[in-house]
């Protein structure tokens, strides 16, 4: 994610109240409801420090099949069937899924109707028979998926002027579909989306053949690599889908409003070279395809949804943004395909591994392509760093999100503050070792999850010496350590880190 300049570091005025009340009506629709004999259902989590009720214990999802029917308007819910295949990893009397902001009509477990109820932002399912560790289970939920936000800026579905896109980071996928909504449980995805014939649907992964029936078309997409729920993307719109080739024949497809296709083409044409540049730094692009969505929507950020990054169209049409800046933002989201998408954070406290690296390649691209020295940006970040740590926490121990503003973990400390720690590491171990570390990181943890301690371990292995003390200070201390090679760099709370052009 990259907040746009207005939003960067400034907590938004968003007040969120998630609606759990929908489940009350859902329960009345359940034809097999029985009075629960056990303790009342409660929301569960996997113990994420920043999002305590995100994710659920006791199972590991292998695949999601999302069947969505778009009614051709944004003011009515989509009809949906979400099918979840999972391995059971602990004996379970109940299965908690993350889901809110939709009405559940029925739940089946291995084809047998099951009881369900809501608890907080969880959908709690009680199968007829207890699930045992080692079982394989299929849970089928018939539900609605409501594109009308409970509160503006909640995330999940984002209305555009011509349809919908998704923005699920960090914790909003479960406003769209029932899931185990934590990046530590990656899974394969199939999307089957039915929409009126005038719409074009694009989702993560490779397309199947669209099937037309009467006034509707059903579009199918499948991921070829596991994906975190927060990175799911479904674009429904009056869109053009220009295609081209990237390095090594990599299929590229973009999604732009049909009317803007020609005007946006010069930006779209930049992607192949940007991918080649990233590959020259860290190795092969990790997925089956890539492309960008330029959406007629106001999100306040850009987002690295897997294989299909989401941008606000106005990033490309606002004359105040210099070209080098727009391109470096494109590279920021592109680099997330390696850092954040292919290698996903173990917990949300590891989000600096996403944003620190994406900021790093954003800045490196600006240095190499637009003569904006990395050292200047890092010196400015250094001056501001103690202030960022005080307000947002150190890079690897971000403060909890502000109540009602869950994406407020995306603070300067995990962007330039974390890139600054990477800069310190490069100063400490030298450029060749640092570049080797980056390549090994995305190779060794590809299609998987990794934590801050994994990064410290690999850095130490590559450097041939124990860097845990050095990196702990840079990632966890309240005060910013001295910068190796730049003893003159000082904290200066009066300095505004001039990392971005001013936005009017
Ligand atoms: Zn980002």
Image: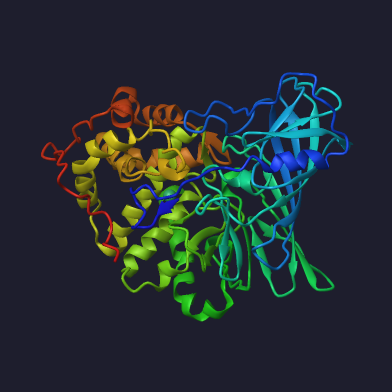
Q: Position of residue 443 (x, y in %)?
A: 51, 41
Q: Quadrant of the C terminus?
A: bottom left
Q: Position of residue 468 (x, y in %)?
A: 34, 24
Q: Is residue 404 visible?
A: yes
The answer to which quarter of the image holds residue 68 is: bottom right
**Residue at left 75%, top 43%?**
25
Q: Is residue 429 visible?
A: no
**Residue at left 54%, top 44%?**
342
Q: Nearer the viewer, residue 428 or 493?
A: 493
**Residue at left 39%, top 40%?**
436
The answer to which quarter of the image holds residue 321 is: bottom left
Q: Position of residue 141 (x, y in %)?
A: 78, 43
**Left or right for 38, reference 174:** right
**Residue at left 23%, top 38%?**
387
Depicted 197 relative to depicted 220: above or below: below
Q: Position of residue 502 (x, y in %)?
A: 26, 62
The answer to which quarter of the image holds residue 427 is: top left
Depicted 393 relative to depicted 259: above or below: above
For the rendered model, the colour scheme is: rainbow
Q: Nearer the viewer, residue 110 or 78?
A: 78
Q: Report the label total.
A: 0
**Left or right for 70, reference 161:** right
């Amino acid at each position: 994610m990259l907040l746009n300049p207005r939003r960067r570091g400034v907590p938004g005025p968003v007040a969120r109240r998630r609606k759990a009340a929908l489940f009350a009506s859902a329960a009345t629709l359940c034809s097999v409801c029985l009075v629960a004999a056990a303790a009342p259902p409660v929301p569960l989590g996997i113990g994420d420090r920043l999002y305590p009720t995100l994710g659920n214990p006791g199972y590991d999802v292998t695949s999601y099949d999302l069947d969505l029917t778009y009614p051709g308007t944004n003011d009515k819910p989509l009809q949906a069937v979400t099918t979840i295949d999972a391995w059971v990893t602990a004996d379970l009397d109940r299965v908690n899924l993350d889901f809110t902001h939709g009405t559940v009509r029925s739940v089946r477990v291995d084809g047998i109707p099951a009881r369900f109820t809501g608890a907080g932002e969880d959908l709690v399912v009680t199968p007829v028979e207890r699930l045992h560790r080692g079982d394989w289970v299929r849970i089928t939920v018939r539900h609605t998926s409501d594109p009308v936000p409970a509160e503006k800026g909640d995330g999940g579905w984002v209305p555009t002027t011509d349809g919908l896109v998704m923005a699920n980071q960090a914790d909003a996928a479960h406003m769209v579909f029932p899931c185990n909504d934590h990046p530590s449980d990656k899974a394969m995805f199939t999307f089957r989306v039915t929409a009126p014939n005038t719409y074009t649907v694009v989702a993560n992964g490779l397309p199947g053949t669209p099937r037309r029936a009467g006034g509707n078309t059903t579009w199918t997409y499948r991921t070829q690599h596991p994906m975190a729920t927060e990175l799911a993307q479904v674009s429904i719109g009056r869109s053009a889908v220009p295609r081209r080739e990237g390095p090594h024949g990599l299929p590229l497809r973009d999604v732009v409003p049909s009317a803007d296709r020609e005007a946006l083409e010069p930006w779209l044409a930049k992607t192949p070279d940007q991918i080649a540049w990233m590959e020259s730094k860290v190795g092969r692009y990790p997925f089956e395809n890539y492309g960008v969505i330029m959406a007629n929507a106001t999100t306040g950020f850009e987002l690295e949804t897997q294989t299909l990054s989401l941008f606000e169209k106005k990033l490309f049409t606002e004359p105040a943004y210099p070209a080098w800046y727009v391109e470096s933002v494109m590279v920021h989201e592109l680099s997330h395909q390696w850092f954040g998408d292919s290698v996903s954070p173990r917990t949300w406290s590891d989000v600096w591994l996403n944003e620190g690296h994406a900021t790093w390649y954003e800045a490196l691209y600006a240095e190499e392509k637009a003569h904006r020295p990395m050292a200047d940006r890092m010196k400015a970040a250094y001056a501001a760093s103690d202030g960022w740590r005080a307000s947002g926490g150190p890079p690897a121990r971000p403060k909890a999100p502000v109540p009602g503003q869950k994406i407020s973990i995306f603070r300067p400390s995990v962007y330039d503050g974390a890139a600054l720690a990477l800069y310190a590491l490069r100063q400490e171990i030298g450029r060749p070792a640092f570049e080797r570390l980056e390549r090994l990181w995305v190779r060794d943890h590809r299609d998987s999850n990794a934590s801050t301690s994994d990064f410290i371990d690999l850095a130490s292995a590559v450097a041939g010496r124990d860097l845990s003390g050095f990196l702990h200070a840079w990632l966890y201390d309240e005060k910013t350590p001295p910068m190796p090679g730049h003893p003159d760099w000082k904290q200066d709370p009066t300095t505004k880190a001039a990392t971005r052009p001013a936005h009017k």
